[in-house]
């Protein structure tokens, strides 16, 4: 999805000050952004091009004087500004990863570094048919919808209806309307997948507690040669899903990766890594589906230890409790209601005539 031109009402924008602090807000006629250093008025921002610099005010009446001060000394208008007001922000449309990190959440989201790796190792491209299990707050769904485009198809299965609402609302706010190439289904993965056509999907992504128990149904709906990627957070889950793929004979030797992210600072010759980095957040287990009647070729190795896990012995209620322990779906009912109310307000602020099509600009042929 590409948005160009002046900033419009209903869009989300990101304000960044000279210290790198960011604020993400949805533009609403008559709305305001209350910062630590004054107020920004939405009406002054709607219609501006991206990359504009806006200055905080203490009241609406300061607009003219603030603009005049900026014209007199555009490099240092804050030197004579009061403690509140006179602080500058650059306004841009947020990148997708910025949107995701600032959007209301029901379930915990995947980190952008892991999402980017999923798109790469699962080889998700425009026009593909993708099946996703575990919609959560929609972080992965937004990237998949962008990757396959309106010529593709994304089917998302989410077990909890509340999280499905959060996922759908976040996608609606991001695209400006609900994507027409997206099927969002609520229910257990095996039950929902049983109603899907065989060999229909090019790619499958699983983000769930026990992906090894879903491999049979996943194999039925994926096309031969299709790629499956499972996101798990513990080594116990990692071991189970890898061994299940090998034992079934239906999947090629699994590739297992994790991604670390470390930022750097560069000021002249003072170049150094940041003091903090994003370390382990999860593992990606990727494999490909064999054609029916053919067994996968694996290197003959004997496991060095027992790979049994007691997760299969848990009841459905115990598995939901385990999800909270793994911090994959932990949220209180009160917070979830607040998230849904916030998203309902954002969706209601989108212009009624908005569609995904009229917000995408395609080059003339």
Image: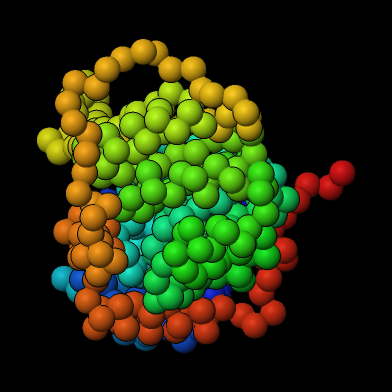
Which of the 4 image quarters holds residue 257?
top left
* Closer to the camera in the image, 96 or 161: 161
Residue 306 appears anywhere in the view: yes
Which of the 4 image quarters holds residue 278?
top left
* Closer to the camera in the image, 365 or 314: 314
x%, y% of residue 319?
A: 25, 61
- For the C terminus, the quadrant is top right
Name the residue located 20 percent from the left edge and 49 percent from the top edge.
310
x%, y% of residue 4?
A: 63, 56
x%, y% of residue 143?
A: 50, 50
* Closer to the camera in the image, 112 or 265: 112
Query: Can you say whether 150 is above or below 177 in the image?
Result: above
x%, y% of residue 118?
A: 44, 39
Name the residue located 26 percent from the left edge and 42 percent from the top edge.
237
8 on left or right of 117? right
Name the residue located 59 percent from the left edge and 45 percent from the top edge.
220
Residue 110 appears anywhere in the view: no
- For the N terminus, the quadrant is bottom right
């Amino acid at each position: 999805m590409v948005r160009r031109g002046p900033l419009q009402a209903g869009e989300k924008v990101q304000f960044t000050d000279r210290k790198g602090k960011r604020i993400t807000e949805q533009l609403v006629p008559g709305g305001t952004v209350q910062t630590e250093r004054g107020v920004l008025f939405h009406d002054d921002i709607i219609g501006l091009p991206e990359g504009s610099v806006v200055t905080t005010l203490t009241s609406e009446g300061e607009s003219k004087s603030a603009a005049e001060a900026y014209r007199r000394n555009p490099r240092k208008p804050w030197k004579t500004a009061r403690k509140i007001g006179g602080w500058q922000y650059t306004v841009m449309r947020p990148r997708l990863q910025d949107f995701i990190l600032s959007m209301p959440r029901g379930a915990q989201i995947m980190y952008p570094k892991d999402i980017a790796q999923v798109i790469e190792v699962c080889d998700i491209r425009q026009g593909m048919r993708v099946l996703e299990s575990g919609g959560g707050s929609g972080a992965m769904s937004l990237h998949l919808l962008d990757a396959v485009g309106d010529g593709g198809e994304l089917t998302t299965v989410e077990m909890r209806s509340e999280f499905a609402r959060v996922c759908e609302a976040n996608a609606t706010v991001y695209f400006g309307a609900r994507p027409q190439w997206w099927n969002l289904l609520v229910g257990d993965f095996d039950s929902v997948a049983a109603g899907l056509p065989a060999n229909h999907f090019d790619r499958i992504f699983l983000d769930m507690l026990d992906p090894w128990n879903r491999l049979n149904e996943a194999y039925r709906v994926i096309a031969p040669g299709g790629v499956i990627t499972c996101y798990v957070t513990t080594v116990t889950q990692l071991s189970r899903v890898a061994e299940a793929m090998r034992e079934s004979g239906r999947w090629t030797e699994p590739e297992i990766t994790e991604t670390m992210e470390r930022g750097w600072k560069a000021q002249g010759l003072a170049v150094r890594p940041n003091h903090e980095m994003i370390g382990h957040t999860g593992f990606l287990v990727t494999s490909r589906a064999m054609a029916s009647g053919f067994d996968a070729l694996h290197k003959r190795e004997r496991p060095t230890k027992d790979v049994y896990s007691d997760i299969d012995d848990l009841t459905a209620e115990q598995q939901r409790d385990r999800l909270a322990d793994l911090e994959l779906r932990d949220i209180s009912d009160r917070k979830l209601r607040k998230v849904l109310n916030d998203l309902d307000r954002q969706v209601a602020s989108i212009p009624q005539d908005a569609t995904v099509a009229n917000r995408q600009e395609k080059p003339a042929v």
